[in-house]
Image (tube, rainbow, N blue to C red):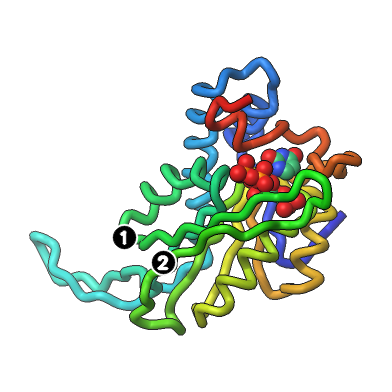
Amino acid sequence: MAYKNLIELSHPLVKSYITKIRDKNTSYFEFRQYVDKLSVLLAYEAGKELGLKARKIKTPLAPYNGSVIKDEIVLMPILRAGLGLMNGFSSIFPEARISHLGVFRNEVTLQPIRYYFKFPRLRDKKNTIIYILDPMLATGGSMCSAIDEAKKTGAGKIVAACLVAAPEGIKEVHKYHKEIKIFTCAIDKKLNNKGYIVPGLGDAGDRLFGTL
Ligand code: PRP
Ligand code: URA
């Protein structure tokens, strides 16, 4: 199915690494290593949303009309599993500032419960881009809650980045925030009756942190 404002990565490395993390026999430390690799590729792709401004420099040989990133970047991992995407994103965007948003799903109602939010003071709201990071977009409740918070900051652009997205979650995000671009490494079939993505990879937080 084609969705607007949805970018699914198609690189062979992405396909291969995502298979590794889906595998139930992958250990939590290998899982973390492959999530790191995926987060680099995801950050590279999502970096296409950044604006440039001109910068004149001098090479050792001649003047050069170059470019630098115009936007201030804020990374907003959704605790806790969103932390898994931080190594890759912060290596690609080393100057980014980091906001933490604590949200977990009530296991019965699947409703998002927000428990923590810390956000940096923005110098130039219009030219700020917030990357919301969460490996799993399931019902979309957590991501919608994060987008609501991100919008209150007045940042000019908000982008969602995840590893696996369910059609239900994509539709939910775009029902309330149709302008938000979602970058994902995979789009899966559906949610099961407990709100887990199928085929998915299980509970991302537990697999990342070894809390199974
Ligand atoms: C997971 C995941 C997302 C959320 C997705 O977090 O990391 O934040 O579920 O589900 P949704 O789209 O239906 O809201 P979880 O609530 O398990 O918390 P954790 O990261 O602390 O393990
Ligand atoms: N959160 C997860 O960690 N996994 C899912 O499949 C759905 C929500």
Q: Is residue 119 above or below residue 35?
A: below
Q: Residues within 10 Å of mark 1 (few under 14, many from 20)?
A: few
Indicate which disc, 2 or 1, sits on the residue closer to the N terminus.
2
Residue 40 location in percent, x, y? 47, 44
- Residue found farthest to the right: 193
Q: Is mark 2 within 8 Å of ligand 1?
A: no
Res. 95 mark: 1
Residue 117 location in percent, x, y? 50, 63
Residue for point 32% across, 69% down: 68
Residue 103 location in percent, x, y? 61, 55
Quadrant of the rendered image containing residue 11: top right
The amino acid marked with disc number 2 is Ile
Q: CA distance from mark 2 to mark 1?
A: 7 Å
Q: Nearer the viewer, residue 127 or 67?
A: 127
Quadrant where the C terminus sits is top right
Q: Nearer the viewer, residue 21 or 196?
A: 196
Residue for point 64% across, 36% down: 204
- Count the labels in the image: 2
Determine the secondary structure under disc 1. loop
Quadrant of the rendered image containing residue 62: bottom left
Q: Is residue 21 above or below residue 92?
A: above
Res. 73 mark: 2
Q: Is residue 68 above or below residue 165?
A: below
- Residue found farthest to the left: 60
Left or right: residue 130 versus residue 106 is: left
Res. 150 mark: none
Q: Residues within 10 Å of mark 2 (few under 14, many from 20)?
A: many
Quadrant of the rendered image containing residue 122: bottom left
The amino acid marked with disc number 1 is Glu
